[in-house]
Amino acid sequence: MNRPLFPLFCGLVSWLAVQIAIAIEPFVVEDIRIEGLQRISADTVFSYLPIEVGDEADDDRIADAIKALFRTGFFSDLDISRSGEALVISLVERPSIGRIEFSGNRTIETENLIAALENVGFVEGRVFDPSIFDRVEQEIRRAYFAQGLYSARIESTVTPLERNRVEVGFDISEGIAARIRQINIVGNASFDEDDLLDEFSSISGGFFSIIRSANLYSKSKLAADLEVLRSYYLDRGFVNFNIDSTQVSITPDKKDIYITINLSEGLRYIVRDINLQGDVGDIEEELRALIIVESGDIFSRKEVTESSRLIGERFGNDGYLFANVNAVPILDDETGAVDLDFYIDSGKRVYVRRINFSGNAKTRDEVLRREMRQLEGSWVSTSAIRRSKERVERLDFFDSVEVETVPVPETDDQVDIDFTVSEKSSGNILLGAGFSQSEGAVLSSSITERNFLGTGSRVKFSFDNSEVNRDISLSWLNPYWTIDGISRGFDAYNRRTDASAANLTDYNLDDIGAALNFGIPVSEFTDIRLGLEVKQTDFILGTSPSEEIIRFNQQNGPDFITLLASTSWSRDGRNSWILPTTGSLSRLRAEIALPGGDLTYYKISAQHQHLFPIPGSFVLMIEGEVGYGEGYGDLTSLPLTDNFFVGGLRSVRGFTANTLGPRDSKGDPLGGSLKTVGSAELVIPIPFVEDAGALRVASFFDIGNVYGPDEDFDADMLRYSTGLSALWLSPIGPFTLSLAAPVGEKPDDDTQSFQFTFGTSF
């Protein structure tokens, strides 16, 4: 049956039923019987029926009853008759919606389409009402129109199922999304239209319009762009800016969209006076220092909002968790000036009753609690809570860490802090393979438990084998050896090194050693580390050793013992250990080979890295490292086995690994006792990569060299390179590459423009 005629048909049935009912003589209803119900309860019918037992049933009341029951939409047919003094209501239920199926929907997920149908009450389990079918299809079309798919077609089918149910199917042909061909902005006197459109995500030109879906129309994207346009003006002084209207027109073939935006700029305002009102107390100067905007600046909503946030956070750090800061601009249209009044309502100081943890089935509560910088019983601090969350996340025991402040019932000055964590596997058995141009094929295996028995201690046994190194090691670290956070760790290892395979002079080393290490926290971001290590080294001459190697072997023998004491100071304020984007890292390190061993020497080094976020998702990273070493006692210079080396992916890219600096009598690299390395990288955002957090691409400039014991620093000997680098933390392991061009290389330098490493685990 044609659906537009369905309401007419229902009206005709209702009229006929009423006419039949008119033939019933009035009588007093002593009983009401309902027949034909399957899913709908009798109580539901009685709730809609305007006649009750004891009422007189006449023509009008029976007609009203028929209309009321039809109006529910539950029934496709009904009949009311008299049986003695009883009213008999015979009903035929409409089928219920047993299933709703979609096919052909690629752009919009099925869950989102089902949610759209809920808006018109069309859901599984409800009574199937054909009269709303047009509204149902229109709701689906509206969802596709919002995505710019104006040519979408919907074909619907209704298939009977058992138990008086139906399956409703929607076969969707989405068509091609309409493209935005032009956006016109009307009323922009202060800014060029092209500059404004550069802020839009809905439209772009040139190369990116081909490889991206930037020009595809979407109602939500346009709404977001209009908000970007509003922010653009409000952040540049136009306090009364308004978008008057937006017209969206589509071509007859439904392929192209033309948009016209009409706006009113209003006046541009300059900040005149800044006032603090309310609960300022004796910290007014401190609060004023937090206000970003200054008198004489162009008004910026972004800066005003950020100033309000900083003031609120300052009060939050003193326990006023619910402090409210409201910035009110007062406009002077005659002078174009705006006064800013920050109204501060600190509210009550709030204390922490309890800190609760959930989701940590394996990890002990104490492991989490010792990372807390917010304490129970003290007033709440927003920065302490945030730092506590960061510290728990950096444990790397959890997939997710959520924190919530929950008001304590029947109080207005207490909260509980609830941490909810989702644990991930902390133990793994790793087998790995990879390739490095500096080390050749690499095979590795390890057994690691980063959260041993839920205590937070780390245990690791590893085996690595490459053309350069074969390393077997066992390590254990307790990060909280004492309650104050002093860590203690042990290491034992056996390491064999083929120096010639690492582009060095011709010798082999076989080291067996053990170490004891302590870490002492000085502040939230700073620690000091102390270490003591003893190792025995077998020094093995190669097949064709140089004079320098033979002389070292004669002076120190084929084997020697070294006693190493080390200390380091570091401050790590970066936002992440992996691919950081802001903050800095500073590190100082010193180690000395103590008397009592066969070798006596010392090495000192300093490193600094600083990351500067730049608008547009760029990051500028500057880092440098200086190292120096020298022998003492019987040694007049740093042992060549402990020299510094420069060149390759980890220092000056574009030069072969470890090859810069002094060379021996055979022309092989020896390394040196003075190392200088610097680098500047500009991390470039990648617009069409979804998981950009696992990929970093950068342009770089490297500088550095290493100097021998008889050489002083000479800037003319520094080597330079520039190029592009990429680091991808792929699902099968890290992949690193660089394409570098050495600058001003010398004739005897070993260069390597393309360098890479990759690895995998299984």
Image (tube, rainbow, N blue to C red):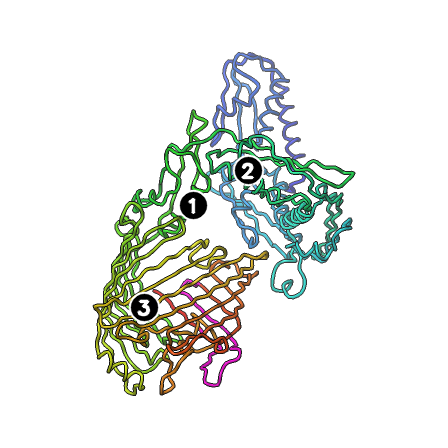
Q: Residue at x 52, y 25 (%)?
A: 45
In the picture, the quarter occupied by the N terminus is top right
Circle 2 sits on which residue? 128
Cα separation, mark 1 vs mark 3, equals 37 Å
**Residues in magenta, as a range:** 729-755
Q: Amino acid at mark 1?
A: Arg
Give the alpha-carbon distance from disc 3 to disc 2, as whole Å: 85 Å
Q: Residues within 10 Å of mark 2 (few under 14, many from 20)?
A: many
At mark 3, the secondary structure is strand
Q: Residue at x 56, y 17 (%)?
A: 51
In this view, 164 is above or below 52: below
Q: Is residue 747 magenta?
A: yes
Distance Cα–Cα, label 1 vs label 2: 54 Å
Q: Is residue 325 magenta?
A: no
Helix, strand or loop for disc 2: loop
Give coordinates of residue 639: x percent, y percent: 30, 75
Quick one: which residue is furthest to the front in this view?
Answer: 633
Q: Between residues 71 and 469, which one lies in front from this camera angle?
A: 469
Is residue 595 shown above or below 380? below
Q: Mark 3 or mark 1, which is nearer the start of the sequence?
A: 1
